[in-house]
Image (spheres, helix red, strand yellow):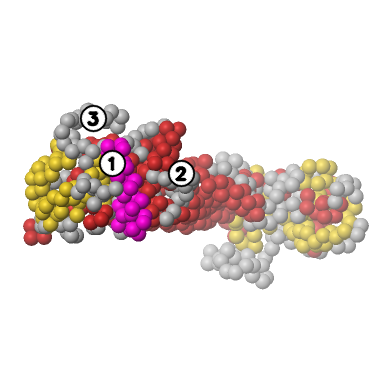
């Protein structure tokens, strides 16, 4: 008997292809939207967390300029190398300090040129920003002290200037400075702000100061806090020390600021998560609207089908047989809608993550949740109106206009 | 009657197949109450062919609904093969319809977008017959009403007369004891009406199926053995026809 009722239900779906499709369209779109939003959002968040891990542990950046206000003010007092030495000497729980200055310069090799960030620093900078030399070698102490004409290239610069060729040992030109390539850095990819971290040339700080900028200034101090030490405490001590070194009276505002890279990254993560939650909420609304669509079509079709229900009852169908048929129709339709939605969601998630350049991370639980929701909506709204119709006296159902 | 199930037919009692005794039907309550039937006594024997006539509102449709176990009397008793139908549950009445009755409606009431064969098969589906037997019996029923070759057509592709013949095939496919027809020719021209009536007469004569038929036209009623005239909820008079054809 159950087999026969299933056949009746499937026949009914098959002979009303358009109505069936309209019924499940809302579910398809709703399920696909929710899964896509949650999956893409989750992938973006995961990527940011991955980037935080790659940024270097417990990194603080000391920058000149006031914290508030738009950008750097004119007449900022820059740092000197002595500041880095003082920080390393006077503050406990510090693993390493790297003074850094950067200039945007054109790098030239043969007939290739590429404008990039030239960073003057030392081997410590490479270490605390979680970089590593892939081929070739780091600077020697001698090269750092004497300001030798040597450089280490990021992957992007190497590719732009040398293509597939070997770069180590070659000489490139940075403005008027001709320097020897010592090594190539391990690729790092984009940072949280979407900047290419491999678009970089590192030279000794002294070399930059003497041969490019012509002064002793240092733009930024990178401070790496030891493991297990409190970043907040070091941040405070740094502030006290720098105020002292810059001779600020208690009434003066800081003319420098200490940024915690992790804090920034965390902020970005929470922003991404908030956005994901927002988009998911919008998607959830579309799933709800899809559910209402199903309800509508089911209601309308049951009204249309009341006479049919009457005929079936008059012929000798039991109330429960009519109900079972409608239930099976609803289950089959909403499951089909859910499955099609999942297929669509997988396709659009893979596509979107590829376009947004984030890793695709499969999220099984949201698939199950939205599938169950769609099935529940379909079954409830498919079943309830049918229950109403099947309770009717067969005569009333037959006369229904 | 407690042994009534989907697969086991009842043992058939001797005597009248349908008996109404003092059947009244009141719709609504209080002042709005409407007396559709007022004390109807009727006895129909197996193999009878009864036409029911009367102006609209005379209670003939209500009477047919009660005979068809679609409705129960407010008072009085309706016996089907000696069983008091008023004491049966909703489901038991559905099973009674499934196994003993066939319906032909004025508006055909076929399933749209559904082939003639599948429409005729429907009562057999609820009887739980396996597909090959369903096809065979539905096919036979369609042949019996002269619709061989039209099995795959949907109601939309059939004429009114053909649709009514599909409905007749559906009513007889399960081998009913009684066929109830509510104005079976109401929507048809006289030539189609004659065809339908010939089919019904043949079912009555050759297969011994009891037929109760509502009609407005006396020449249609003339096919029956007798005509019962309803007026104001009771039987006004009964005419015995010689039977036509």
Asked if residue A145 can be seen in this view, the reply is no
| A63 or B1: nearer the viewer | B1
Left or right, B232 with respect to A293, comes to left
Question: Which residue lies under the disc numbered 1?
Answer: B204
Do circles 3 and 2 both sit on a common chain?
Answer: yes
Mark whose residue sits in front, 2 or 1: 1
> x, y percentage for residue A148?
86, 52
Q: Chain of mark 1?
A: B
Q: Which of marks 1 and 3 precedes in the sequence?
A: 3
Task: Return the residue at label 3.
Answer: B10
Tell me the distance, in whole angstroms, between the alpha carbons under discs 2 and 1.
21 Å
Q: Which residues are magenta?
A: B184-209
Give coordinates of residue A388: x percent, y percent.
Answer: 28, 49
Q: Is residue A208 magenta?
A: no
Q: CA distance from mark 3 to mark 2?
A: 33 Å
Residue holding disc 2: B148
């Amino acid at each position: 008997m159950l087999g026969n009722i299933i056949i009746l239900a499937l026949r009914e779906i098959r002979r009303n292809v358009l109505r069936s499709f309209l019924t499940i369209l809302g579910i398809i779109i709703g399920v696909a939207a929710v899964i896509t939003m949650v999956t893409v959002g989750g992938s973006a968040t995961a990527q940011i967390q991955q980037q935080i891990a790659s940024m270097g542990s417990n990194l603080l950046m000391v920058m000149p300029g006031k914290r508030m206000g738009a950008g750097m003010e004119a007449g900022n007092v820059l740092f000197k190398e002595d500041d880095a030495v003082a920080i390393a000497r006077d503050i406990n729980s510090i693993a390493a300090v790297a003074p850094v200055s950067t200039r945007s310069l054109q790098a030239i090799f043969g007939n290739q040129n590429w404008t990039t960030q030239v960073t003057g620093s030392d081997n410590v900078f490479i270490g605390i920003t979680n970089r590593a030399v892939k081929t070739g070698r780091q600077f020697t102490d001698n090269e750092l002290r004497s300001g030798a004409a040597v450089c280490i290239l990021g992957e992007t610069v190497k590719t732009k200037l040398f293509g597939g060729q070997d770069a180590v040992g070659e000489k490139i030109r940075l403005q008027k400075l001709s320097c020897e390539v010592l090594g190539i850095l391990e690729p790092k990819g984009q940072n949280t702000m979407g900047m290419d971290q491999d678009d970089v040339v590192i030279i000794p700080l002294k070399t930059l100061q003497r041969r490019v900028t012509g002064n002793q200034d240092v733009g930024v101090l990178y401070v790496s806090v030891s493991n297990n030490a409190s970043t907040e405490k070091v941040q405070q001590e740094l502030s006290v020390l720098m105020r002292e070194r810059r001779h600020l009276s208690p009434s003066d505002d800081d003319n420098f600021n200490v940024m915690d890279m992790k804090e920034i990254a965390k902020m970005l993560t929470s922003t991404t998560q908030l956005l994901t939650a927002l988009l998911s909420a919008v998607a959830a609304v579309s799933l709800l609207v899809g559910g209402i669509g199903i309800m509508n079509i089911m209601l309308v079709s049951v009204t249309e089908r009341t006479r049919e229900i009457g005929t079936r009852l008059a012929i000798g169908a039991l109330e429960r047989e009519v109900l079972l048929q409608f239930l099976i129709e609803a289950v089959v339709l909403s499951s089909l809608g859910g499955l099609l939605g999942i297929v669509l969601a997988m396709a659009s998630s893979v596509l979107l993550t590829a376009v947004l350049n984030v890793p695709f991370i499969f999220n099984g639980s949201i698939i199950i949740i939205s599938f169950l929701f769609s099935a529940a909506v379909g079954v409830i709204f498919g079943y309830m109106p049918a229950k109403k119709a099947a309770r009717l006296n067969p005569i009333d159902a037959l006369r229904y206009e | 009657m407690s042994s009534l199930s989907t697969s086991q037919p009842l043992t058939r009692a001797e005597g009248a197949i349908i008996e109404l005794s003092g059947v009244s039907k009141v719709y609504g309550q209080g002042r709005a109450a409407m007396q559709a039937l007022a004390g109807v006594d009727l006895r129909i024997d197996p193999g009878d062919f009864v036409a029911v006539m009367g102006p609209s509102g005379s209670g003939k449709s209500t009477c047919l609904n009660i005979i068809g176990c679609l409705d129960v009397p407010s008072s009085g008793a309706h016996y089907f093969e000696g069983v008091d139908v008023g004491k049966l549950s909703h489901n038991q009445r559905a099973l009674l319809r499934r196994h003993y009755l066939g319906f032909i409606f004025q508006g055909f009431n076929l399933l749209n977008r559904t082939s003639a064969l599948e429409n005729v098969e429907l009562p057999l589906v609820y009887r739980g017959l396996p597909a090959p037997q369903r096809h065979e019996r539905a096919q036979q029923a369609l042949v019996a009403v002269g619709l061989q070759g039209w099995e795959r057509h949907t109601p939309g592709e059939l004429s009114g007369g053909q649709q009514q013949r599909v409905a007749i095939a559906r009513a007889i496919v399960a081998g009913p004891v009684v066929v109830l027809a509510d104005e079976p020719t109401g929507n048809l021209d006289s030539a189609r009406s004659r065809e339908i009536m010939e089919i019904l007469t043949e079912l009555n004569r050759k297969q011994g199926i009891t037929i109760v038929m509502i009609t407005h036209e006396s020449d249609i009623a003339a096919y029956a053995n007798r005509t019962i005239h309803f007026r104001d909820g009771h039987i006004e008079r009964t005419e015995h026809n010689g039977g036509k054809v």
